[in-house]
Protein backbone atom coordinates (compact mmCIF):
# COMPACT_ATOMS: atom_id res chain seq x y z
CA UNK A 1 0.00 0.00 0.00
CA UNK A 2 1.13 3.55 -0.70
CA UNK A 3 2.21 5.87 2.09
CA UNK A 4 -0.58 8.01 3.47
CA UNK A 5 0.54 11.65 3.99
CA UNK A 6 -0.01 12.88 7.52
CA UNK A 7 -0.14 16.44 8.78
CA UNK A 8 2.51 18.01 10.97
CA UNK A 9 0.03 17.92 13.85
CA UNK A 10 -0.44 14.19 13.40
CA UNK A 11 3.33 13.85 13.33
CA UNK A 12 3.42 15.70 16.64
CA UNK A 13 0.90 13.26 18.09
CA UNK A 14 2.96 10.30 16.83
CA UNK A 15 6.04 11.66 18.55
CA UNK A 16 4.21 12.51 21.75
CA UNK A 17 3.23 8.84 21.92
CA UNK A 18 6.90 8.07 21.26
CA UNK A 19 7.97 10.29 24.15
CA UNK A 20 5.33 8.86 26.46
CA UNK A 21 7.25 5.60 26.20
CA UNK A 22 10.08 7.13 28.24
CA UNK A 23 8.52 5.29 31.19
CA UNK A 24 10.34 2.26 29.76
CA UNK A 25 13.66 3.84 30.71
CA UNK A 26 12.54 4.07 34.34
CA UNK A 27 11.18 0.53 34.23
CA UNK A 28 14.49 -0.85 32.94
CA UNK A 29 16.52 0.97 35.58
CA UNK A 30 14.24 0.72 38.60
CA UNK A 31 12.70 -2.77 38.37
CA UNK A 32 15.31 -4.97 40.08
CA UNK A 33 14.62 -8.16 38.12
CA UNK A 34 15.28 -7.71 34.40
CA UNK A 35 13.13 -10.75 33.58
CA UNK A 36 10.11 -9.08 35.14
CA UNK A 37 10.76 -6.05 32.93
CA UNK A 38 11.27 -8.25 29.88
CA UNK A 39 8.03 -10.09 30.63
CA UNK A 40 6.17 -6.78 30.82
CA UNK A 41 7.54 -5.68 27.45
CA UNK A 42 6.76 -9.08 25.89
CA UNK A 43 3.18 -8.94 27.15
CA UNK A 44 2.72 -5.42 25.75
CA UNK A 45 4.29 -6.41 22.42
CA UNK A 46 1.92 -9.34 21.96
CA UNK A 47 -1.05 -7.18 22.93
CA UNK A 48 -0.02 -4.45 20.49
CA UNK A 49 0.42 -6.89 17.59
CA UNK A 50 -2.97 -8.47 18.26
CA UNK A 51 -4.68 -5.07 18.52
CA UNK A 52 -3.10 -3.89 15.26
CA UNK A 53 -4.13 -7.12 13.56
CA UNK A 54 -7.64 -6.63 14.89
CA UNK A 55 -7.73 -3.24 13.17
CA UNK A 56 -6.66 -4.75 9.85
CA UNK A 57 -9.25 -7.52 10.22
CA UNK A 58 -11.98 -5.03 11.19
CA UNK A 59 -12.79 -6.90 14.38
CA UNK A 60 -15.73 -5.46 16.35
CA UNK A 61 -14.87 -3.13 19.24
CA UNK A 62 -11.09 -3.48 18.93
CA UNK A 63 -10.87 -2.15 15.36
CA UNK A 64 -12.97 0.99 15.93
CA UNK A 65 -11.10 1.68 19.15
CA UNK A 66 -7.74 1.44 17.42
CA UNK A 67 -8.99 3.55 14.52
CA UNK A 68 -10.27 6.25 16.87
CA UNK A 69 -6.84 6.73 18.43
CA UNK A 70 -4.39 5.92 15.65
CA UNK A 71 -5.96 5.80 12.16
CA UNK A 72 -4.96 9.33 11.17
CA UNK A 73 -1.40 8.72 12.34
CA UNK A 74 -0.88 5.64 10.17
CA UNK A 75 1.54 6.17 7.29
CA UNK A 76 0.06 3.16 5.48
CA UNK A 77 -3.48 1.85 5.54
CA UNK A 78 -3.14 -1.90 6.10
CA UNK A 79 -4.50 -4.51 3.75
CA UNK A 80 -7.43 -6.48 5.11
CA UNK A 81 -6.27 -9.25 7.42
CA UNK A 82 -2.63 -8.13 7.44
CA UNK A 83 -0.38 -8.26 10.43
CA UNK A 84 0.69 -4.68 11.09
CA UNK A 85 4.10 -4.09 12.60
CA UNK A 86 4.01 -0.42 13.52
CA UNK A 87 6.69 1.79 14.98
CA UNK A 88 5.22 1.11 18.40
CA UNK A 89 5.74 -2.61 17.93
CA UNK A 90 9.37 -2.04 16.98
CA UNK A 91 9.85 0.11 20.08
CA UNK A 92 8.58 -2.74 22.24
CA UNK A 93 10.71 -5.29 20.37
CA UNK A 94 13.77 -3.14 20.97
CA UNK A 95 12.89 -2.61 24.62
CA UNK A 96 12.52 -6.36 25.09
CA UNK A 97 15.79 -7.16 23.33
CA UNK A 98 17.98 -4.57 25.06
CA UNK A 99 16.52 -5.53 28.43
CA UNK A 100 17.54 -9.14 27.86
CA UNK A 101 20.93 -8.49 26.22
CA UNK A 102 22.35 -5.51 28.10
CA UNK A 103 22.83 -4.35 31.66
CA UNK A 104 20.03 -2.05 32.87
CA UNK A 105 22.21 1.06 32.74
CA UNK A 106 23.06 0.45 29.08
CA UNK A 107 19.53 -0.61 28.12
CA UNK A 108 17.95 2.46 29.70
CA UNK A 109 20.36 4.83 27.95
CA UNK A 110 19.78 3.15 24.60
CA UNK A 111 16.01 3.57 24.87
CA UNK A 112 16.35 7.19 25.99
CA UNK A 113 18.39 8.05 22.89
CA UNK A 114 15.96 6.37 20.52
CA UNK A 115 12.79 7.83 22.03
CA UNK A 116 14.02 11.42 22.15
CA UNK A 117 16.48 11.61 19.25
CA UNK A 118 14.10 10.05 16.75
CA UNK A 119 11.28 12.39 17.80
CA UNK A 120 13.54 15.44 17.50
CA UNK A 121 14.78 14.38 14.07
CA UNK A 122 11.26 13.98 12.69
CA UNK A 123 9.81 17.19 14.12
CA UNK A 124 12.79 19.43 13.38
CA UNK A 125 13.33 17.89 9.96
CA UNK A 126 9.74 18.44 8.87
CA UNK A 127 9.53 22.00 10.17
CA UNK A 128 13.01 23.37 9.58
CA UNK A 129 14.60 20.96 7.10
CA UNK A 130 16.14 22.97 4.24
CA UNK A 131 19.20 20.96 3.33
CA UNK A 132 18.38 17.58 1.85
CA UNK A 133 20.04 14.47 3.22
CA UNK A 134 19.72 10.94 1.77
CA UNK A 135 16.33 9.26 1.65
CA UNK A 136 14.34 12.49 1.59
CA UNK A 137 15.55 13.47 5.05
CA UNK A 138 17.30 16.66 6.10
CA UNK A 139 20.62 17.51 7.69
CA UNK A 140 18.71 19.67 10.18
CA UNK A 141 16.90 16.52 11.31
CA UNK A 142 20.19 14.65 11.53
CA UNK A 143 21.65 17.42 13.69
CA UNK A 144 18.56 17.38 15.93
CA UNK A 145 18.95 13.63 16.43
CA UNK A 146 22.58 13.99 17.46
CA UNK A 147 22.12 17.01 19.72
CA UNK A 148 18.93 15.93 21.46
CA UNK A 149 19.78 12.23 21.59
CA UNK A 150 23.22 12.75 23.07
CA UNK A 151 22.03 15.58 25.33
CA UNK A 152 19.36 13.35 26.84
CA UNK A 153 21.86 10.52 27.18
CA UNK A 154 24.25 12.79 29.10
CA UNK A 155 21.42 13.87 31.40
CA UNK A 156 20.42 10.23 31.94
CA UNK A 157 24.00 9.13 32.67
CA UNK A 158 24.36 11.99 35.15
CA UNK A 159 21.14 11.04 36.95
CA UNK A 160 22.13 7.39 37.34
CA UNK A 161 25.70 8.22 38.38
CA UNK A 162 27.29 6.43 35.43
CA UNK A 163 31.09 6.22 35.10
CA UNK A 164 32.77 8.80 32.88
CA UNK A 165 33.69 6.26 30.22
CA UNK A 166 30.01 5.90 29.27
CA UNK A 167 29.82 9.54 28.21
CA UNK A 168 32.58 8.87 25.70
CA UNK A 169 31.11 5.53 24.63
CA UNK A 170 27.71 7.14 24.12
CA UNK A 171 29.23 9.86 21.92
CA UNK A 172 30.80 7.18 19.73
CA UNK A 173 27.76 4.89 19.64
CA UNK A 174 25.31 7.60 18.65
CA UNK A 175 27.11 8.13 15.33
CA UNK A 176 26.38 4.69 13.81
CA UNK A 177 22.93 4.87 15.39
CA UNK A 178 22.33 8.13 13.51
CA UNK A 179 23.55 6.47 10.31
CA UNK A 180 21.10 3.61 10.89
CA UNK A 181 18.30 6.17 11.20
CA UNK A 182 19.42 8.02 8.09
CA UNK A 183 19.82 4.88 5.96
CA UNK A 184 16.87 2.98 7.38
CA UNK A 185 15.51 2.37 3.88
CA UNK A 186 18.68 0.69 2.65
CA UNK A 187 19.18 -1.34 5.83
CA UNK A 188 15.53 -2.41 5.85
CA UNK A 189 15.56 -2.30 9.65
CA UNK A 190 13.17 0.00 11.47
CA UNK A 191 15.14 2.74 13.23
CA UNK A 192 13.07 2.29 16.39
CA UNK A 193 14.74 -1.10 16.61
CA UNK A 194 18.23 -0.44 15.24
CA UNK A 195 19.02 2.72 17.23
CA UNK A 196 18.68 1.25 20.76
CA UNK A 197 20.44 -1.97 19.77
CA UNK A 198 23.45 0.01 18.46
CA UNK A 199 23.63 2.53 21.31
CA UNK A 200 23.06 -0.19 23.89
CA UNK A 201 25.88 -2.26 22.42
CA UNK A 202 28.28 0.68 22.70
CA UNK A 203 27.35 1.35 26.31
CA UNK A 204 27.46 -2.35 27.20
CA UNK A 205 30.95 -2.79 25.76
CA UNK A 206 32.14 0.21 27.76
CA UNK A 207 30.67 -1.27 30.94
CA UNK A 208 32.42 -4.58 30.33
CA UNK A 209 35.79 -2.96 29.59
CA UNK A 210 35.92 -0.50 32.46
Image (cartoon, rainbow, N blue to C red):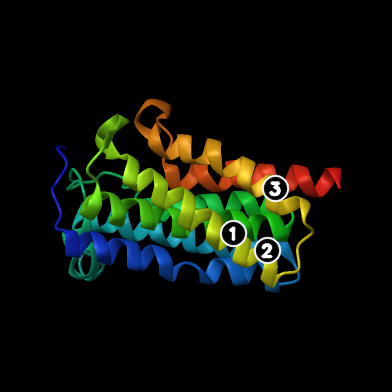
As drawn, 85 above or below 14? above
User: Quadrant of residue 58 in the image?
Assistant: bottom left
Whichever of callouts 3 and 1 sits on the residue coming sooner in the sequence is: 1
- Residue that carries the numbered disc 3 in the rendered image: 168
Where is residue 121 shown, x and y percent of the image? 36, 51
Horizontal and vertical percent for residue 23?
53, 72
Compared to residue 4, the image places residue 54 above or below, namely below
List x then y, in percent, for residue 15.
33, 62
Between the residue at mark 3 and the residue at mark 1, the CA separation in whole angstroms equals 11 Å
Which residue is denoted by mark 2 in the rendering? 157
Give the distance between the C-alpha atoms of the residues marked 2 and 1, in whole angstroms: 6 Å
The residue carrying mark 1 is: 153
Quick check: marks 2 and 1 in contact, CB under 8 Å? yes
Task: Return the mark for residue 87.
Answer: none
Closer to viewer: mark 3 or mark 1:
3
Residue 26 lies in quadrant: bottom right
Q: Position of 38 compared to 189: left or right?
A: right
- The residue sitting at the top extreme is 186
**Residue 38 seen from this side:** yes
Question: Is residue 59 in view from this perspective?
Answer: no
Question: 108 or 36: which is nearer to us?
Answer: 108
Pointer 1 local density, CA inside 10 Å: few below 14, some 14–19, many at least 20:
many
Q: Name the N-terminal-most of marks 2 and 3.
A: 2
Residue at the (42%, 71%) spot, across then down = 20
Residue 125 picture location, percent across and down: 28, 49
Amino acid sequence: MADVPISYWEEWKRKLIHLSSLWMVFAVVLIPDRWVTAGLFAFMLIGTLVWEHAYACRWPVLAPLYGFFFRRMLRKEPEHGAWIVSGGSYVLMAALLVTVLYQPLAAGGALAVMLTGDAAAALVGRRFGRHKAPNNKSWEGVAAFLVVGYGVLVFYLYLVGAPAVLYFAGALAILPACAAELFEKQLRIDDNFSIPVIVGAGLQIALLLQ
